[in-house]
Amino acid sequence: MARHIVAPVGEIPAGGRKLVSVAGRAIVVFNVAGEFFALNNRCPHRGGSLAHGKLTGLLESPQPGKYRYSRPGEIIRCPWHSWEFDIRTGRSWCDPQRLRARQYKVSVEPGASLVEGPYKAETFPVTVENDYVVVEA
Amino acid sequence: MNIELKQPLRTAKSKLSIVDCDIHPRASLEDLRPYLSNHWWHYIQTYGLRQRHGHVKGYPFPKPTPLASRRDSWPPGGGPPASDLDFTREQHLDFYGIEHGIMNPLAPSGQGDQNAELSAALAFAINEWQVADWVRREPRFKASVVVPYEDAVASVAEIRRRAGNRDFAHVLLLSRTSEALGRRRYWPIFEAAVEAGLPVGVHVFGYSGWAMTGTGWPSFYLEEGIENATTTQQLIASMIMEGVFERYPDLKVVLIETGFAWLPALGWRLDKHWQRMRDEVPHVKRPPSEYLREHFWVSTQPMEETDKAEQLIDVMEWIGFDRLLFASDYPHWDFDDPFLSLPPSLSDARRRAIYADNARALYRLA
């Protein structure tokens, strides 16, 4: 398990996402209103790329004819078969116990603490003035 | 695109030969213009296309994604999914190492249009377009003989026009015809297909003018998807009970995108009724399930997802491992990934049969 610097914080704005390759794995990093989450990009259902999915919210219905839409921007819908995943947990809405996208730890670290290592950076320079998104994988 | 990230998987599976039996290239009307007469071009500009379905502009049942397509299949250079040959080749054929892809173009293809002559003109145009704009540029693609199936005479003319041209893999119908498919009005199409040595592919959907269920129109697209199985059951029963296969013993039918887990139950039910009431259909000489297993092939997509893989394998065994054809349905939203959709416990021999050998034999692919 190593920690990887995947982006300057400003590169992934709120509501944005970035697909990164970390230790040979495709990982998608989301910014949900300032909080960062990282999921394995491969949909656990049939392999679609979650980074290409539609960002949406949670649609629920207590009974026919009534519906509730909540948590906008916290659900990613796979671009292939439309399976929905909670970005906060990686769990699918329809089968949360069995079908979940693997989650990785993410943190935001100041550049000053990163320039010394032992982090692995992507191919961009790390400067002390910036904050960076760090994925543990 | 994250294509480079999937590369290791592709390399690992590169020994797998794949024939994809359901790819949907998309023509625009402008693409078809060179193959339409001025009369039909101006007709379309003035009067438009009219499906056998009233009061509808666009899809009668809105799809879950734009143009019912994978969200990652829109070509970067513009245009709708599978309209750009280069991107289709890159994202699909090259990425998965597909050896041949059978093209089944849907709208605009004229099938089921209210105007019979326009239907025939568009079918001709889309067949020309498939060969000139796709097969000539990428010979891994095989075309379908799209026919205006409500008009048997025009359909026969179109099949004969393409007979002997190996760019075409099969004759293409949609499943919702305006009469049961075994009825005599459609027999000339079967006869011409047999004469030309081509299987008849039946792809789900189409609008016949009739409600799609015995109790009218369902409320949701989800229900429309389920209904594709019942339409297909009915057309199989009709073809067998009308004696189509006694009349055309060499006829081969490919069911495309119909699902398949219901096939054994249909076979059992048909046999049970036939055993009790075969005097009603004396021309049906053998148990119906025998015709079913001899004359029908079925594409895999949308692959049924059973709780236990063995259940799916049991079903496949009943159908016959020589009758299943891998299909992806590219670029549609319910696409099956060639690397991931078959049950992993299948033996290599069965895998090879489903992925390529059955299709090579059926379509006589080199």
Image (tube, rainbow, N blue to C red):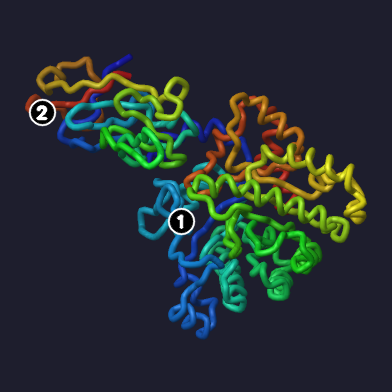
Q: Position of residue A88 (x, y in %)?
A: 29, 25
Q: Is residue B105 above or below residue B120?
A: above
Residue toward you, A61 or A47: A61
Image coords of residue B98 (percent x, y):
58, 46
Look at mark 2 in the image and give the residue it sits on. A130
> Which residue, as the protein is rendered here, is positioned at the far left?
A129
Task: Indicate the position of residue B43 as horizontal and vertical percent values.
Answer: 49, 82
Placement of B74 over or under A14, stated as above or below: below
Mark 1: secondary structure: helix
- Name the subunit of mark 1: B
Give the alpha-carbon distance from disc 2 to disc 1, as whole Å: 41 Å
Q: Camera-side residue: A8 or B237? A: B237
Disc 2, SS: loop
Asked whether disc 2 touches disc 1, contact meaning CB atoms under 8 Å apart, the reply is no
Residue B32, compared with residue B6, is above or below; it is below
Badge 1: residue crowd in 10 Å (few <14, some 14–19, many ≥20) = some
Q: Is residue B230 visible?
A: yes
Q: Residue at x 12, y 23 (%)?
A: A111
Task: Note whether A54 is above or below B218 in the view shown.
Answer: above
Numbered circle sitting on residue B208: none
Badge number at residue B86: 1
Q: Report if residue B250 is visible in the image.
A: no
What type is the residue that disc 2 sits on?
A: Asn
Residue sitting at x 44%, y 53%: B62
> Which amino acid is tagged 1?
Asp
Q: Work out whether residue B185 or residue A131 is closer to the camera in this orientation and state it.
A: B185
For disc 2, the chain is: A
User: Quarter of the image containing the N terminus of chain B?
Assistant: top left
Q: Residues within 10 Å of mark 2 (few under 14, many from 20)?
A: some
